[in-house]
Image: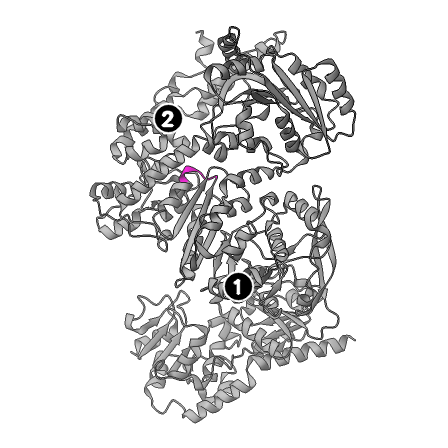
Amino acid sequence: MGEKSRDEIPVDRMKGASDIDDKNVSGVVTRVRSLVKVPEKLKPAVRESFERFASSLDRWPTIAETVRGRQFIHALLSSRIIDRTYYEAQAGRQFVSDADVAQHFVSVGAEAGLSVNPLIEDEWFRRAANRGVASANTLLFDGTIGLAELGPLFDAKRYAGETGSGIRSSLGALQHFLAATTESTMAPTSERIAEVETSESYNEKRELLIEEARRYARLKAFGGPRLRPAAASDLQQSSEFLRAHVGALSGAVERPMVSIVMPARDRAHRLDESVRSVLAQTYENWELIIVDDGSVDSTPDVLREWSAIEPRIRVLTQEPSGVSAARNRAISAAEGVYIAFLDSDNAWAPEFLALTMAWMTSHNDRVVHTAILRHVGSSRILYQGSQVLGHEQLLQAGNSVDLNALVASAELVRAVGGFDDRLRRWVDYDLVLKLSLHEVPTFLPYIGVHYDDAVGNEGRISTTEAGTWEKAVLEKYLCDWPRVEGASRVDGRISVVIRSNADTWRTIEAVSDVFATNPDKDIEVVVVVSGASRGVSASIVAALGANPRVTIVPLLRRHSFGLEANVAFGNTTGEFVCFVDLGVAGSSNWLEPLVSHLDGDHTLGAVQPLIIGADETVASAGLAFGGSHILPWDNLDGHPVEDAEAAALPRRVAAVSWRAMLVRASTFIAARGFDVLYGDGYGDSKFCLRLRQMGFGSGLVSESRLRIRPGYKWERSIDQVGAARLLNEFGPTLPEPDQEMYRSIGAEIRGYQASSVLSSALARIGQPIIVRDPSDTCLRWAIKTAAPAGPRGDRWGDTLFAEDLAAALRSHSQRAFVDRREGVGRRSAHLDDVVIVLRGLDRVAPQPGATNILWLISHPELVTAEEIAAFDLVFAASAPWAELATRKYGREVLPLLQATNVRRFDPELRTDEAASDVLFVGSTRKTYRPIVRWANDVDADLSIFGPGWDGLVAPERIKGLSLGPDEVGTHYASARVVLNDHWADMAAEGFISNRLFDAVASGAWVVSDAVEGMGELFGDAVRIVGSREELRTALDDPSARPPRDELLRQAGRVRSEHSFEERARALVQAVERLSRSRV
C-alpha cells in the first residue's frame, strides 16, 4: 500500500475499538467510492459491479461492532439472566450452552426481537421507562438506569420495595429475584395488569410464556415473503431441477392425459400467447378446454380458429357466469387424469407439463406447483414459489401457490368440489386450501410460468373485484358457522370481543376496564391478537393468558374488523356478545343497561351505548342515514352530550356502530355475522340493514356510556370498498334521516355537504348540513370553560359551576350545555345562539353569529381591553372590579356574583353522621393555606377533606381526599364552623369565592378572610378574621356563632337571591334586552 493510501485510515485512530465507530466506517466507504474512478467507457454492468463492491463495505462488520458484540456477550453471560429454555422456544432450535444463546442473541436474536428472559420485554420496558429507542439490553451496561418495569411480569421498583433489600438497579433486582425464586414465588408484576392478574406463580406463568413462544415461532415460520426479487440463482436452480427430473419421463410407458382448463372472457387480444405456450409443450398428451364465458369481443372468432387448427383444443361456450363457473364446466368435461390451469393472459414454459408429469407419476404426488416469474413493468421481475408446510400455513400466511403453476389429480379436484362459484375473486386460494386439507402441495423449483403484470390488467378480476374476497375465502375455514350454531351458550353471560391492534397497553387497559366497570356480571373477554410482533404477543399472554375469563385468539396477519370479529365470535360462550373498540373506557356498569334494554325488547337486534369523545362531545349516538345513495355517519357527532340527552334517548336508530355493539349471540349467528366483503368500512351498517331484513331494529342506550381514551385516534376512516358495496347493495333503499331527532334539539337537516370523492363507489361522503330549526323558540346556550375533558376536569370547580348554570338555564326553558377546554370549537358550534365564556385561565374567542357573553369569575389580571371589547355583554363576579373595569376600559361591565345550587346546598341536609366541629374542604393549592395553618396552630378540632395535606396536619385530621358534589352540602350543613379563604389577588379585586355562597346557603356559619362586600352579602353568617388570634377568638367564643334562626334566615336569603336560577334569569333577561335593542 502506498503512502497516500495509508492516510485514508490514520494510525492514531486505531488505538482502540472504542475510538472506531460507524460514522468513521461510513467515511471510509465514502472515500473508497471516491478513489474508485470507474471510466465512463466501461460497460454499465462493470460500473455497477464496482458500486456493489463499494456498497458492500457498509455491511462488513467493523472492528468497533465486533468488540461491542464480544463485550455484550460477556456481560450477558456474567449477568446470569439467560433462560435457555425460553430462548430456545422463541428461536425454534436448541443450544448447547448459555454461551451459544448469548452469541445467537447478539448476532441474530436481538434484531429479531427475541428476549433472553420471560421477565424482559423490550417494547414494554421502552414504553414504561419512556426511553424512546433505548433497549432493555442497555441495562447490562448503563448504570444510570434505575428501577423500572422490565416487562408486564417484573416491576423492579415494586420488587425492591417489597424485599427491602436496598437494590438500586433493575438488573440487580432481576438477578436477586431469579436467584431467590422457588416453585411458589409470585412475580412482582406491573400495576398495569393488576385488574386482570391471576394467582399463578412465576414458574407457572413462565411455562405459559414458553408455550406461547413455541406457538409464535411456529406461526412466524409460516410468514415468509410470497414474492421477492428474482435472482440469477433462481434460474440456475430451475435449470438444474429440470435436467435432473425431466428425463425420468422419457422411458416411462405411462403418459397420462392432462386436461388444461382455461376460462376466457373478452380476451381476444391476449389468448394467442397463452394457447401457443400450450402448443409448445414438450409433453403431448393433453387437451385444452377453453370456456368462453359470454365474451362480446372477437374472442369467439379467435377460439374457432384455434380449435380448427388443433384438434386437442375444445371450446365450450356459456352465458356470463363468472370464472368459477367457467372452470367448473371445464372440469366436468375434462377427460384427463390430471388437471392443470392456465389463464388466458399467462404463458407456460415448454417443459411445464413434461416436468410436472414426470414428477407426479414417479412420486405418486396428487398436487404439485412450480415457481413463476412475475414481470412487473419493463425492468422488475419477481419470483414466487416455495414449499408450503400445509393447510395451516396457507390459511395463516396467505396463498403462495399460483393457480397457473398448479397441477392436481382430476379425481381430487372433483372430490373437493372444484371452484366455489359464490366467490368472485381469490377462487384459486380457495381451491388450494381445499386441496391442502387432503394433500400438501409439493413445490417443484422450476420456473414453469411467466406472468405479465403489466399487460392486459383491465379485464382481470384482480383489478375489477375487491381484495376483500380473500376474507370471504378465509371466513370459510376460520369461521365454522354450523359448529358455532350448534354449540351451547351460558345464559346471562356477556362475551366481550376486543381487537388488540397490536397495542399491548391499550389491550390490557381495555380488558381491565371491562372487568373493573362491570364487577358483578358474568363476563368473558375474547382478545384477537393479529399481526403482532413477538414482544406484543408475549406481553399480552403474560398479562392475560392465565386469566380463566380471557381467551386469546392469535392470527399471523392483520385482517379486516369484520373477519376478526367473526373469528373471535366463534370463541365466545355468552348469551350476549359485545364488540368493543380498543380505545374506549366505560362508565360504571355500562354493560347492564345495554343487556337490560336488548333483553327487554325482542324486536331489537343490536344496541350501542352513547360514545363520548375525548373532548367531551358526542362521538357516536348510533349511525344515521340520509336516504337514497347517501353514506351513513355517526349520529350527533360533535354535538354536546346534552343534545343526546334531549333527543328522547334511548331511542331507535337506523344502525349502531361495531365499535361498541351488543347483540344476542343467536341473532348474530342467524345473520352469519359481519359481511367480510365490506373490509373495514360500513360492515356495521350492512349488519344492521341485514337485521332490518330479519325484522329486528337497532337501538341507542344513553344511560350506558363509553368515553374515548385521550390520545386515541377515533376518526372513522372512509373505506372505499365498503362504501361501494353498501351503495351497490342498498343504495336506493337506504333509510331516510331521523329528522325528528334533530327537531328535538332545535335543529334540522337542510342537505348534505359533499366532501371527499370516492372513485370506487362513484359517490361523495354525505355529511349532513344541520341548521337551527326556525320554528324552535328556545335559545341554545353554550357555556365554555377552561376545565379539561375527562375525570381530571370533572373535579374542577369551573365544571360544577358551568353544569349548575346550564341546569338553571334549562329550568328557564332554554337549551344549554357545557363545553370543556378541548370542545370549545366543536363541530356543532354554529348552532349556538348564545355563548357564555366563563373566563378563568383560558381565553376564548367570540363565536361569529352568536350573542357572546364574557363572565369573569377568576383571574381578572389576565383580561385585556381587547378581549372585553370583543364581547356583546361582559359580567364580573366582583362589584368593585366591574365598576373599576367600566371606568378603565370605557364600556359597561356589569356585576354578576357567584351563585349556589339550592338542591345541593340546603340546611335540611344536615345529619349527625356528617357532623364536625371545624370543617375545611379543599386542597393545599401547593401551599399551607393560612386559614388552615391558623386552625391547626390553635389546636382546633379540624376535619379536612382534600388532597395534599399529609405532613402538614395530623393524620387524624384528614378525613378524606375528597367529597362528592352531593356530599359537600351535607357536610357544610352539619358542621359547627366552615373555614374559607381566598387567593390573595382575588380577594384584593373583590371576587368572593363560591364556597361562601354554598356554605351560607347550607345554613353554615363560616369563618373567612376578608373580601370587600362580604358583610353586606352574608351578614352575621360570615365571621371575618385576619390573624391566628382572631381565628382563635372566633372558634373559642361560644357567643360568636349566631343563633341557628339567624343562620337559616341568611341561608334563605342567599338561596333566594343568589341561586343559579336567579343568575340564569338575569342572563336571559340581559340577552332579551340586547336582542330588542338591535331590532
| Percent position of residue 226, x then y | 53, 27
Could you tell me if residue 33 is visible in this image?
no
Can you identify the residue that label 1 sits on?
Answer: 598
Q: Nearer the viewer, residue 1062 or 515?
A: 515
- Examine the image and state in which quarter residue 1029 appears: bottom left
Rendered-image quadrant of the N terminus? top left
127 relative to 1068, above or below: above
Q: Nearer the viewer, residue 592 or 406?
A: 406
- Examine the image and state in which quarter residue 943 appears: bottom left
| Percent position of residue 596, x then y | 49, 66
> Which mark is first along the chain, 1 or 2?
2
In this rendering, position of residue 439 left or right of residue 1075: left
In this rendering, position of residue 428 left or right of residue 925: right
Q: Nearer the viewer, residue 822 or 599?
A: 599
Rendered-image quadrant of the C terminus? bottom right
Counting every numbered tag in the picture gives: 2
Image point 27% across, 27% down: which residue? 99
Q: Main secondary structure of the magenta part?
A: loop
Q: Which residues are magenta?
A: 531-535
| Percent position of residue 815, x then y | 64, 72
Q: Is residue 211 magenta?
A: no
Q: What is the secondary structure assignment of the residue under circle 1? A: helix
